[in-house]
């Protein structure tokens, strides 16, 4: 397991020999302490009583050593300190103080006691010393854990656990795409977030940030520890195939503790220049403030903890026409046409938009007695963001094409932990989550629908699309869901074995109203077409027969039931082995509305659901302490989960009966329609379209579930080592921690979307299949190709007595998939990736791969003023850019009217390439061949179809700095902390540094336009700006935050 910082070293005194090290366990919300008691001869001490006291709350756990001297205590609170006392006949009592237990980790406490016949012999005590744990091994697999010290000291600019988990080089926070978390090259939608054992991830699947809400759904100050588990080979873990981000919250204690904080920044504290380009961010302020407090209600019995936090800030944009190859004059001429000819109210190009976010967390912790304790928690969050629906290197949205996306979440959880005997412990939990999601166009839904105008660039040689009006996906969009979760688990210790068994049930119910193009979508191929009203494409979708979108809502539910068993065998005091089985199965009585025409067309029913689908997941892992300074760990297992519910919801919403679509006939002009409401196009849906839906006799598009659909799952294999090395070298020093992990994942079954009506109609000059048919019917099925990911990681860390510690990390990722499943809508999942065969896509580099990533952590702490610490914390990251593909242009005619720009480009060998038609534009061909010659990625692909995502954007390097100074408080034990954090220090020093550049979603670089003529490609134009990426403005700018916190 990677440990990216220093690991606490144990201590030994006189007759007590003690080892404190991480041994894998996988309690999702708790910790455990286990070990072996022997005498000075090495003989096992049986029948000894081990008393484990949690000093902050006074709660006690008791265990008894077995015939082999083994003991185990489960369901312990995360953190500490604990004192562990060993008593019994025939030996001197012993106690270990200052023991800490990390999330999911079984702390190994192996003690050698001194035999004695004197029952009054004085107890021998050892205090575990060393620096506070910052990262420690979790479970039997690659993972990282971050404790309260890291949470408080790291430069967490956004007060978000993403600021912490990014310290692991295998975890990339994509600041260009809503801060999504890419774990080991996997789709962020396949992650899971659990808080106190309750899933608070994006259960429905609309958010790319991984949260059900717009920001972290709980207060940052409520977190005790957080871990990232990439492959925990323990049956307690489920509902993910990428990674599990696991957080536990603070609890009150016998002393009152808390804090108040305030954090501030504004436009004057934010950079305004990237690579020489001035950015107008407008005027804005960002403030975060909050309070947290915990303490006793009844000492040693009942405790509380509460945290409140509010954010008042702004989303920063700063997009300009020049960013997408357009002059200000050309852009304004198109806006003028919209305003003067069609009555549009321009939304401008927003520099920033004000947003708010509010959250509250409350917790009661009750020590019922020495054998039972209970926890009750409540979480509330309501917040929003503004987003442009369509942006990138060739897309520019007007301000009215932005939308508010927000959510309100509430969560109630109750948990009972019980120790029935020294060997038997249980955990029983029930939780309820309710979420109301909102996605609202800035201009509302009673004005324009979506209007797209394709514009030849006057500052480049490509084409840019301008977007006006309400985004097509937010014209009728409302979601709320409820999630009940129940768990009962037991741990039984018998000799060298710890047996685990459990059952869980998740009940999910959802209401989802989602109708795209509910007030229309118009596309125009040029500014002239827009001015003349010549429509290239128009679509209107609504409830068949009624034109009332509410009639098209999906309302359904299902249940996931889980059983698991496991044996953790302490083979020797050096080796433990874990083996278990996890079994998941679905139940559901809700089915999509049956469509007889669909079955008659394709021979399959559209009313399949998840009922009866199941998966058995074997797990195996081990930990082996080869020597005091060298240990190995590894395992294998099958994992499932993290697949968005929206993919299932699509089958209920798009049954072909409830909804129907109207498409404009070829050659239609706006004047060919009548408009009965305001009498104006774009404000009104044409009467002809409304009448068609009202009297529709045909069926609409259908999304269906494959009757043979298998639950998506993935095999994971891991092996790693941790060593403490004496280098006797400057800087590296002695006791250098070296950590290495290999993680290999292989798809067992992956989700994919395929078009049902595509029929091969021919073959292209380069051998790719050509298809005919519509893109209205889709099947959610399993991919034919099996993806994989290989992740190699290495870490070095060191801590010195002078207050300096540092850590270096590196991760190499090679991830392949066939269908990246980038979106929530079936058509988008089908269309938004590059391929040469949309029916049977081949493996290619994953959209989520970050091939190389380096991380640096540096901390320095010193008391320049007595008892008042000064701390410097620096985090740096450098990574290869996002992958992208060279494709044919939008104006090509290879795959119908929809997504020619996702067809991977054929790369000519030269001007005389036999696949290039003589009728091609000679200037375009010459420019293309010259461009290929000067591009390594293209030159190496000559004579073939470009491989998906075989190119990568530029490297990105970023440093964040935090300076903290402790100051006195009003009382002797209180402290005030003042800090300044600087995000993207490089950009502060030089506007050319720290720049994040990407091609943008979905990663297509349109190379040239072509038609097929007499078995050859006729190249009609070349895009000289195919390599042109765009600057992602917000993460490229420096920003300074000032903050203050009072701790009591």
Image (cartoon, rainbow, N blue to C red):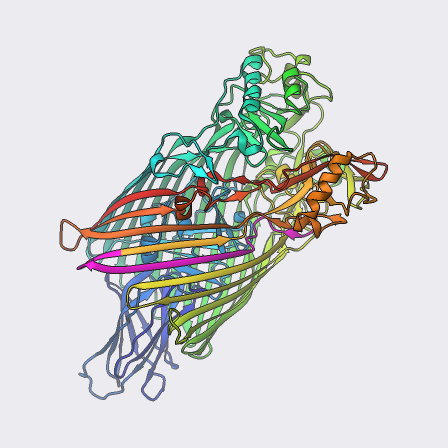
Q: Is residue 581 left or right of residue 33?
A: right
Front residue (pair 783, 149) = 149
Residue 519 sits above or below residue 364 on the image: above
Front residue (pair 324, 154) = 324
Could you say where residue 8 lies in the image, as x and y percent from the top left? 34, 68
Could you say where residue 30 lies in the image, as x and y percent from the top left? 37, 60
Q: Is residue 650 left or right of residue 378?
A: right
Could you say where residue 704 lies in the image, as x and y percent from the top left? 66, 40
Q: Residue furthest right?
A: 1014
What span is in magenta? 842-870
Q: Residue at x 77, y 49 (%)?
A: 943
Residue 871 sits above or below residue 314 on the image: below
Q: Residue furthest left?
A: 971
Could you say where residue 75 lies in the image, as x and y percent from the top left? 36, 62
Residue 50 sits above or below residue 443 on the image: below
Q: Residue at x 53, y 17 (%)?
A: 344
Residue 239 visible somewhere in the drawing:
yes
Residue 366 sits above or below residue 598 on the image: below
Q: Is residue 98 magenta?
A: no
Front residue (pair 273, 656) = 273
Front residue (pair 394, 626) = 394
Number of callouts: 0
Residue 838 visible somewhere in the drawing:
no
Q: Is residue 853 magenta?
A: yes
Q: Is residue 129 left or right of residue 809?
A: left
Please tell me whether the stretch drawn in magenta is mainly helix, strand or loop. strand
Quadrant position of residue 28: bottom left
């Amino acid at each position: 397991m990677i440990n990216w910082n220093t690991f606490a070293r144990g201590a030994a005194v006189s007759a007590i020999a003690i080892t404190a090290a991480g041994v894998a366990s996988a309690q999702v919300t708790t910790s455990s302490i286990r070990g072996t008691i022997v005498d000075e001869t090495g003989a096992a001490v049986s029948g000894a009583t081990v008393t484990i006291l949690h000093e902050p709350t006074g709660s006690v756990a008791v265990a008894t050593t077995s015939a082999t001297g083994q003991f185990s205590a489960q369901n312990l609170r995360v953190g500490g300190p604990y004192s562990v006392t060993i008593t019994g006949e025939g030996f001197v009592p012993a106690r270990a103080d200052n023991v800490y237990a990390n999330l999911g980790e079984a702390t190994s406490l192996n003690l050698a006691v001194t035999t004695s016949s004197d029952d009054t012999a004085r107890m021998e005590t050892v205090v575990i010393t060393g620096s506070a744990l910052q990262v420690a091994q979790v479970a039997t697999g690659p993972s990282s854990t971050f404790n309260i010290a890291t949470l408080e000291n790291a430069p967490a600019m956004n007060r978000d656990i993403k600021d912490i988990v990014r310290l692991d080089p295998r975890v990339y926070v994509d600041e260009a795409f809503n801060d999504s978390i890419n774990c080991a090259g996997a789709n962020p939608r396949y992650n899971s977030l659990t808080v106190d054992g309750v899933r608070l991830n994006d259960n429905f699947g609309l958010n790319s940030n991984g949260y059900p809400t717009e920001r972290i759904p709980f207060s940052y100050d409520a977190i005790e520890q957080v871990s990232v588990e990439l492959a925990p080979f323990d049956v307690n873990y489920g509902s993910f195939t990428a990674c599990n981000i696991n957080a536990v919250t603070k609890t009150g204690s016998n002393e009152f503790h808390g804090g108040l904080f305030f954090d501030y920044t504004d436009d004057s504290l934010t950079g305004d220049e990237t690579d020489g380009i001035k950015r107008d961010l407008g005027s804005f302020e960002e403030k975060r403030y909050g309070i947290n407090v915990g303490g006793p209600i009844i000492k040693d019995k009942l405790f509380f903890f509460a945290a409140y936090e509010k954010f008042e800030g702004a989303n920063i944009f700063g997009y300009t026409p020049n960013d997408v190859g357009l002059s200000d004059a050309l852009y304004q001429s198109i806006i003028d046409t919209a305003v003067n000819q069609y009555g549009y109210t321009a939304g401008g190009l927003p520099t920033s938009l004000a947003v708010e976010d509010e959250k509250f967390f409350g917790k009661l912790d009750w020590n019922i007695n020495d054998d039972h304790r209970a926890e009750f928690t409540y979480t509330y969050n309501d917040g929003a963001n503004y987003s442009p629906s369509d942006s990138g290197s060739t897309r520019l949205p007007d301000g009215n094409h932005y939308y508010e996306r927000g959510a309100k979440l509430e969560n109630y959880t109750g948990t009972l932990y019980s120790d029935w005997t020294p060997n038997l412990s249980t955990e029983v939990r029930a939780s309820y989550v309710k979420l109301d999601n909102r996605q609202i166009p800035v201009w509302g839904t009673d004005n324009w629908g979506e209007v797209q105008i394709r514009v030849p660039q006057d500052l480049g040689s490509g084409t840019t699309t301008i977007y006006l009006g309400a985004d097509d996906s937010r014209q009728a969009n409302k979601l709320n869901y409820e999630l009940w979760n129940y768990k009962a688990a037991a741990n039984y210790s018998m000799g060298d074995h710890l047996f685990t068994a459990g059952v869980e049930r998740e009940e999910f119910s959802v209401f989802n109203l989602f109708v795209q193009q509910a007030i229309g979508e118009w596309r125009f191929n040029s500014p002239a077409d827009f001015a003349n009203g010549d429509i290239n494409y128009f679509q209107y979708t609504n409830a068949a027969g009624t034109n009332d979108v509410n009639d098209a809502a999906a309302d359904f539910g299902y249940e996931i039931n889980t059983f698991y068993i496991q044996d953790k065998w302490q083979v020797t005091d050096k080796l433990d082995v874990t083996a278990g089985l996890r079994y998941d199965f679905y139940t559901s009585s809700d089915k999509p509305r049956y469509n007889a025409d669909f079955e008659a067309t394709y021979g399959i029913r559209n009313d399949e659901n998840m009922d009866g689908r199941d998966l058995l997941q074997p797990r195996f892992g081990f930990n082996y302490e080869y020597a005091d300074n060298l240990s190995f760990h590894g395992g294998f297992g099958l994992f499932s989960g993290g697949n968005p519910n929206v993919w299932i919801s699509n089958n209920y919403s798009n049954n072909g009966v409830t909804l129907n679509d109207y498409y404009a006939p070829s050659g239609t002009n706006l004047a060919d329609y009548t408009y009965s409401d305001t009498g104006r196009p774009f404000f009104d849906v044409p009467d002809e379209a409304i009448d068609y839906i009202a009297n529709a006799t045909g069926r609409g598009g259908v999304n269906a579930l494959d009757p043979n659909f298998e639950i998506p799952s993935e095999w994971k294999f891991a092996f790693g080592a941790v060593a403490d090395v004496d280098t006797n070298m400057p800087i590296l020093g002695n006791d250098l921690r070296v950590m290495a992990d290999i993680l290999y994942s292989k798809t067992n079954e992956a989700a994919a979307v395929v078009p049902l009506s595509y029929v091969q109609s021919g073959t292209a000059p380069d051998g790719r299949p050509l298809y005919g048919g519509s893109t209205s019917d889709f099947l959610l099925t399993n991919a034919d190709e099996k993806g994989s990911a290989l992740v190699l990681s290495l870490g070095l860390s060191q801590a010195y007595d002078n207050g300096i510690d540092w850590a270096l990390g590196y991760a190499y990722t090679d991830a392949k998939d066939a269908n990246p499943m980038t979106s929530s809508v079936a058509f988008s999942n089908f269309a938004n990736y590059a391929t040469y065969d949309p029916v049977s896509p081949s493996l290619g580099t994953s959209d989520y791969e970050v091939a190389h990533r380096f991380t640096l952590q540096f901390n320095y702490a010193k008391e320049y003023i007595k008892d008042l610490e000064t701390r410097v914390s620096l985090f740096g990251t450098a990574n290869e850019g996002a992958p992208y593909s060279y494709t044919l242009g939008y104006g090509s005619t290879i795959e119908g009217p929809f997504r020619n720009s996702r067809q991977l480009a054929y790369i000519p060998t030269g001007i005389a390439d036999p696949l290039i038609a003589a009728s091609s534009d000679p200037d375009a061909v010459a420019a293309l061949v010259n461009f290929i010659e000067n591009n390594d990625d293209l030159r190496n692909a000559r004579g073939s179809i470009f491989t998906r995502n075989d190119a990568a954007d530029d490297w990105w390097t970023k440093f964040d700095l935090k300076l903290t100074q402790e100051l006195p408080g009003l009382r002797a034990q209180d402290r005030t902390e003042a800090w300044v954090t600087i995000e993207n220090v490089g950009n502060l020093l030089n506007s050319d540094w720290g720049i994040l550049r990407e091609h943008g979603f979905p990663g297509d670089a349109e190379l040239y336009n072509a038609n097929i003529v007499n078995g050859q490609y006729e190249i009609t134009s070349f895009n000289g700006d195919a390599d042109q990426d765009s600057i992602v403005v917000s993460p490229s700018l420096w920003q300074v935050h000032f903050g203050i916190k009072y701790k009591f």
